[in-house]
Amino acid sequence: MMPMRPSTVLLSCAIAGLVASAAHGQAANYMSVEATAGKPLQLTYHASAHKSNCTPAPLAMFDVLQAPKLGVLVVRKALLTTNKVAGCPGLKIPAEVVFYRGRNGSAGTDHVVYKVTSSGGEVETYDVTITLKPAPPPAPTLNPPSSQKGNSL
């Protein structure tokens, strides 16, 4: 007889995209987003919880399959508060948030592919095409009139 493990719920969210089923129970998520150079853009967040006792499950593992060329991909830890788990109102669990940040001065099309494996073995692949726009120029600063009097001849 196999030991029973607590049931878990995986909370994942893509900001934009189309989800398609892939072979072997994997999910492939195709996204197209716009980003501004120098500004972080949240792509997805990931968290898991045990439904039976409303406790956090271990965090997911990330593998970058194709790194971006015009920027960086960053995974940051966060705390997620959610009411999406039945019987666990106001659940607070650790989460991981994936951000893309284009390098200052960069513009064009970037592409990143990463895989997320939950503690329960569920695998999701994210294939993201990023249209990177240059950062807007800084606002001009006005020089206030000088309070000094000029020299006269």
Image (tube, rainbow, N blue to C red):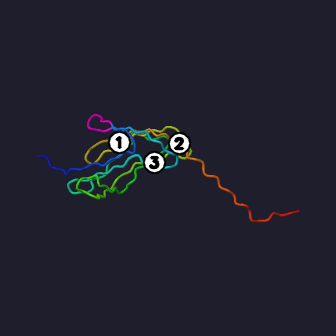
Q: Is residue 29 above or below residue 59?
A: above
* Circle 3 or circle 1, nearest the eye: 3
Nearer to us in this view, 119 or 99: 99
- SS type, badge 2: strand
Residue 21 lies within the magenta run: yes
Q: Amino acid at mark 3?
A: Leu
Q: In 3D space, how far apart are the residues under numbered discs 2 and 3 (Cα atoms)?
A: 12 Å
Q: Position of residue 30 (x, y in %)?
A: 38, 37
Q: Position of residue 96 (x, y in %)?
A: 36, 52
Classify 10 Å Cα crowding around label 1: few (below 14), some (14-19), many (20 and above): many
Residue drawn at x 24%, y 53% is: 86
Of marks 3 and 1, which one's residue comes earlier in the chain?
3
Q: Circle 3 sits on which residue?
A: 41
Q: Amino acid at mark 2?
A: Lys
Res 115 label: 1
Q: In 3D space, how far apart are the residues under numbered discs 3 and 1 (Cα atoms)?
A: 18 Å
Residue 131 lies within the magenta run: no
Q: Amino acid at mark 1?
A: Lys
Residue drawn at x 60%, y 48% is: 137
Q: Which residues are magenta?
A: 20-27
Q: In 3D space, how far apart are the residues under numbered discs 2 and 1 (Cα atoms)?
A: 26 Å
Q: Position of residue 27 (x, y in %)?
A: 31, 39
Q: Circle 2 sits on which residue?
A: 133
- SS type, badge 1: strand
- SS type, badge 3: strand
